[in-house]
Image: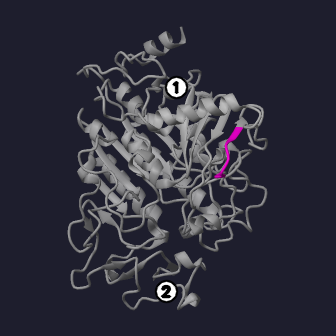
Amino acid sequence: MKQYILFILLTTFLVSCNKASKKDKIENTTPSKTVTKPNIVLFYVDDLGYADIGSYGAIGVETPNVDRLAQNGIQFTDAHSSAATCTPSRYSLLTGEYAFRNKAAILPGDAPLLIRPGKPTLPQMLKKVGYKTAVVGKWHLGLGDGQVDWNKDVKPGPLEIGFDYSFLLPATGDRVPTVYLENHSVTNLNQNDPIEISYKKPIGKRPTGVSNPELLKQKADLQHSATIVNGISRIGYQKGGESALWVDEEFPNVFTQKAKQFINTNKDEPFFLFFSFHDIHVPRVPNKRFQGKSTMGPRGDAIAQMDWMTGEIIKELEKLNLDKNTLVIFTSDNGPVLDDGYADQAVELIGEHNPSGIFRGGKYSAYEAGTRVPMITYWPEKIQTGKSDALISQVDYYASIANLLNIPLDKQEAIDSKNIINALLDSSQKANTQILEESYTLGIRTDEWKYIEPYTGELPNWMKNKDIENGILPKSQLFNIKKDPSEQNNIAKENPELVKKFKEQIQKIVEK
């Protein structure tokens, strides 16, 4: 009955939502010309923990704009990024495919484009039915073919895999090149001062964090102590490109303005905006107006900055009368991390705040807080609001949006994505019965159980030094997540049949 009522309420916007099993891929159907296509805005925050915003229990920072979305939308309590780190999560979100299938890991700053042209992607799918598509913010999915000349057109990139427009941090804020890339070109570049990048050896005469620590706004570990730009030392070495250098404190203004421009340019046709925050990733260098907005130093101030940016985009949608025809999804690419290479007092000033909430671990971890993240869907007057305990994975956004728009998918497209659109639009609806989670190992989550595969491989040195419970051990781990949500009692030895079952399920997924 609830599904029927939901159908009646949304019939102006949804045409024949497929009633496929939640365990199966949606059936291909013929797109209807009568479907009203909502705009889609996906806010993708970086390193935001489950409890890092007010509506999820944050202490020491206020997030009124995101809280407003939660209060007037659906606030999910059991939503997950597909992986515990950024590149794999982004890959899965945009392809509907688990990252291990492409051996996706955290990419170096000079990596080639991970999603190769010809691979089906979420923006490419939306373009088929008339959407304009854009990505603004952090990219970290590689660019070019591995030998990028930053003084020429940089491609393939987002434009070659389904985006009409892109404005990017090419990799991350803590890596060179420290320039913006708009579509194929570095912005404000003087060709008489060409950029050179090296991740292997020092180049140029710029100071480094090792040679000139007195120039730093924040001291950094050795990995992050190469070329200094704007008082922050980065990973890698950069020569030239002086006129193109970014200023970290300007990120919120620059990215928000670019997103607004895209929305205004395309306000008369359906659009998809992938707003990929740099915040709250390191280096955390918030704009002056947000400094001191929290009790937690730069990390908390960066959360306040992120909240402002979110609010600015929502206000723009409302100003243009687009909000009631825009599906908004707000979430994070993985769990939280405090000390991630820079001495910004994230640990010292944490106070009573716990960015993971009651959950164990954080970014990089196989434990629950590695992937359990805040998630909100917001669509004024179009969704059944409230809190939802539906089990959600970001890999399922692809098939769900396809179903919302009645777009058929090929058999080899988004092969790991399932249709959970009812749960995204109605807080009373369920979604998955189980999901796969990726870190340096694989895990299975069901409503009751959390299983983590043993891992006997080598971990990188930087990860060994992280002050976090990564959950990556050479033995099987099994937790009753209902009785033991903080994963304190490993009961794998007492439940060999369950361990065997989950091992077989993982193997079946891997061999798909």
User: What percent of the width, then of the height, locates residue 11?
Assistant: 38, 16
What residue is shown at x 38% (from left), y 44% (from top)? 94
What is the CA distance from the residue labelled 2 to the residue labelled 1? Answer: 49 Å
What residue is shown at x 59% (from left), y 21% (from top)? 428
Q: Which residue is mark 1?
A: 423
Label located before the other in sequence (2 or 1): 2
Callout 1, which amino acid?
A: Ala
Q: Which residue is mark 2?
A: 208
Which stretch is magenta?
472-478
Callout 2, which amino acid?
A: Thr
| Figure quadrant of residue 269 | top left
What residue is shown at x 41% (from left), y 58% (from top)? 137
Is any part of residue 392 visible from this angle? no
Is any part of residue 118 visible from this angle? yes
In the rendered view, how is the structure colored? one colour
Q: Is residue 371 left or right of residue 412?
A: right
